[in-house]
Amino acid sequence: MAAAIEQIMVTKAPGELEELFRAHHVCVLRAAYRVTGSMADAEDVAQTVFLRLARGTIDRDRISNLQSYLHRSAVNAALDLIRSRSHREALPIETVEELPSQLSPSPERAHSSLEMKSSLRRELAKLSPRTAEMFTLRYLEGLDNPEIAQMMKTTQAVVAVTLHRARARLKKGLSGFRKGAS
């Protein structure tokens, strides 16, 4: 995948596009993975984002903060991917962090955790792209509200209110899962 993108970038503008790819690929891939939970899907999202740059379908002159723009593009493309696949009920293969044997979850608990992650991703995909991005930046990327406000060119108050409303919507959307789990 990376080689195909690099080849396209080299044919368009050898230095600039290759440099952008090398500088921002990891950030884009990480943002997409945090939303999709699947490295294969994250790679597809990264390919989509960088192919748009390579094809010139993005007016880079109008972008003031390229890293922020690429992060936002990755989150939005990942949400689009989740929405397009919402009719399927396939669970992504999750990588399980190694835990000490005494802390290993039971198979039932591990399955429940995968179901919860899948439900959360579906509910996250129902949020507006801007709200989903703020939620992702805060709770998956670990940024604080002032950083999010600066990145998204808004105020801390807007970020706080948006996150509060997003949590309420997600809580409501996941209430069925919680009732079914008990």
Image (spheres, rainbow, N blue to C red):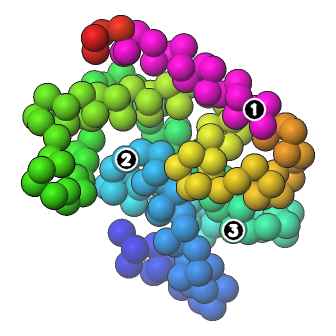
Disc 3 is placed on an element classified as helix
Question: Residue visible at 38% across and 78% down?
Answer: 3
Q: Amino acid at mark 3?
A: Gln
* Viewer-proximal residue among 158 and 126: 158
Q: Marks 1 and 3, how far apart in space?
A: 22 Å
The three-letter amino acid code for the residue at tag 1 is Thr
Circle nearer the viewer, 1 or 3: 1
Marks 1/2: CA–CA distance: 23 Å
* Circle nearer the viewer, 1 or 2: 1
* Residue hosting label 2: 37
Say which mark, if any, is on residue 74: none
Please tell me in which quadrant of the rendered image residue 74 appears: bottom right
Dot 1 or dot 2: first in sequence order is 2
Mark with earlier residue (1, 3): 3
Q: In the displayed structure, would residue 47 be above or below residue 3?
A: above
Q: CA distance from mark 2 to mark 3?
A: 21 Å
For residue 176, side relative to residue 59 (left or right): left
Q: Quadrant of the C terminus?
A: top left
Precedes in sequence: disc 2 or disc 3: 2
Depicted 59 relative to depicted 107: above or below: below
- The residue that mark 3 highlights is 67
Q: Amino acid at mark 2?
A: Gly
Instruction: State whether the magenta stretch is mostly helix, strand or loop.
Output: helix
> Disc 1 designates what residue?
162
Residue at the image position 85 percent from the left and 37 percent from the top: 158
Magenta span of residues: 160-178
Residue at image position (52%, 72%) is 25
Q: Position of residue 166 (x, y in %)?
A: 65, 28
Query: Dot 2: few (<14), some (14–19), or many (≥20) neighbours within 10 Å?
Result: many
Q: Is residue 107 left or right of residue 178?
A: left
- For disc 3, the neighbor class at 10 Å (few under 14, some 14 to 19, many from 20) is some
